[in-house]
Image (cartoon, rainbow, N blue to C red):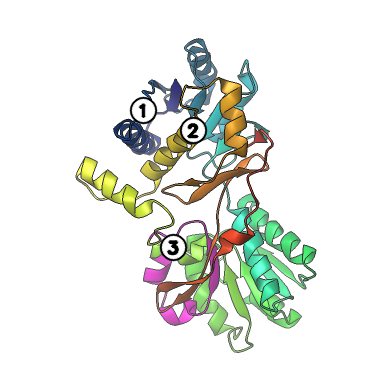
């Protein structure tokens, strides 16, 4: 049995997110059944968006024999159930928690993409970009990507001559961009949210960094549809970015999922939440043996299993957390051009069961 803990009766927007995640969960189970998979019991419980209710819901799922759980959606609820489990082998996969606890067999599909930062640093070294500056918001998720990039670069013999963290909410980037230019890097890596990228990209040209021949390297935000729609192409041309999802690629299931979702619900898919629910269940299903599994068997198979071709990317476990295979792309006139197959640089799944 697979349990689901969502927030169906919470105030919006959490209630809306819960409904969208559930739509993806149910599509995954329907597809599993149509493909001849063994029947799977699904038990959906509602915590109303109140983390303090999750321990009681956990007890019900344990009593009913759950081997894996999708949810809770909030990081606070995920932390509570991680610590309250009677058996630490019980797997939790949250589609949306942004700050999951450091706990065995507890995963989230919504953590920052650090593997992409590592692969982008490897690409920089391979192309002779050994001096790379860092520009990022001074917040945990962006610091994490910046640190992953810097550590990978330095392991390969490169250096970070300057770091320029900035306060979240900054709109004028003159001071940090001048600091970066003065340090003389060959490239700058900028992991930042969509709002910042839309303002930063034109200012890189305004402050003359493009005239200095400095290569811009970016995280997945740089390839976001809204960024490429709202920012003039000339300010994005030539940016090399790492992203876990190229929606047009046949290597992932995004297009298949869009067709499946829109066919089932007769409306456009305009956000990622159903796909996250879809991938969370499918990742659990991918590790279930044909004759079912005990919790510890599922945990071991998830931690060491083969990558899953999902709607939100190619997923596997590494060092106890879910990572997605990076795609390296170049932005040119609003289009994404493949740079290389970054998958060759991705390590095999880690065998540890400790995780996020």
Left or right: residue 297 versus residue 254 is right
Sequence-wise, which precedes: disc 3 or disc 1?
1
- Helix, strand or loop under label 1: loop
Which picture quadrant has residue 296?
top right
Sequence-wise, which precedes: disc 2 or disc 1?
1
Please report the residue visible at 50 percent of the width from the left and 10 percent of the height from the top: 63
Number of the front mark, 2 or 1: 2
Q: Can residue 171 be seen in this snapshot?
A: no
Pointer 2 residue: 284
Left or right: residue 110 versus residue 252 is right
Give the vertical position of 53 relative to 324 (above or below): above
Pointer 1 residue: 8
Which picture quadrant has residue 334?
bottom left
Where residue 213 is drawn, which disc sits there? none
Q: Label 3 neighbourhood size at 10 Å, few (<14), some (14-19), many (20+)?
A: some
Does the magenta segment cover residue 229? yes
* Label 3 to label 1: alpha-carbon separation: 29 Å
């Amino acid at each position: 049995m697979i349990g689901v803990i969502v927030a169906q009766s919470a105030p919006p927007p959490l209630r809306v997110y819960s409904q969208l995640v559930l739509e993806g969960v149910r599509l995954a189970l329907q597809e599993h059944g149509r493909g001849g998979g063994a029947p799977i019991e699904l038990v959906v419980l509602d915590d109303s968006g109140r983390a303090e209710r999750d321990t009681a819901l956990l007890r019900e799922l344990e009593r009913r024999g759950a081997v894996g759980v999708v949810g809770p959606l909030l990081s606070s609820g995920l932390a509570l159930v991680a610590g309250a489990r009677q058996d630490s082998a019980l797997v939790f996969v949250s589609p949306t928690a942004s700050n999951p606890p450091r706990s065995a067999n507890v995963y989230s599909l919504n953590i920052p993409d650090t593997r992409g930062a590592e692969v982008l640093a490897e690409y920089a070294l391979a192309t002779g970009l050994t001096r790379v500056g860092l520009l990022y918001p001074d917040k945990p998720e962006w610091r994490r990507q910046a640190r992953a990039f810097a550590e990978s670069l330095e392991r390969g013999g490169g250096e970070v001559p300057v770091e320029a963290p900035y306060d979240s909410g900054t709109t004028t980037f003159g001071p940090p961009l001048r600091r970066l230019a003065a340090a003389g890097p060959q490239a700058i890596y900028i992991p930042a949210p969509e709002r910042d990228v839309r303002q930063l990209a034109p200012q890189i040209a305004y402050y003359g960094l493009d005239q200095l021949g400095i290569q811009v390297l970016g995280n997945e935000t740089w390839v976001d549809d809204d960024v490429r729609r709202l920012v003039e192409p000339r300010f994005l041309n030539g940016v090399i970015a790492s992203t876990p999802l190229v929606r047009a690629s046949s290597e992932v299931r995004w297009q298949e999922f869009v067709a499946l979702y829109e066919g089932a619900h007769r409306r456009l898919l305009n956000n990622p939440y159903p796909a996250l629910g879809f991938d969370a269940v499918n990742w659990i299903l991918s590790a279930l043996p044909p004759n079912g599994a005990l919790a510890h068997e599922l945990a071991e198979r998830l931690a060491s299993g083969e990558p899953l071709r999902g709607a939100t990317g190619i997923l596997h476990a590494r060092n106890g957390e879910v990572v997605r295979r990076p795609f390296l792309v170049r932005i040119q006139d609003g289009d994404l051009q493949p740079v290389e197959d970054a998958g060759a640089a991705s390590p095999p799944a880690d065998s540890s069961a400790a995780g996020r």
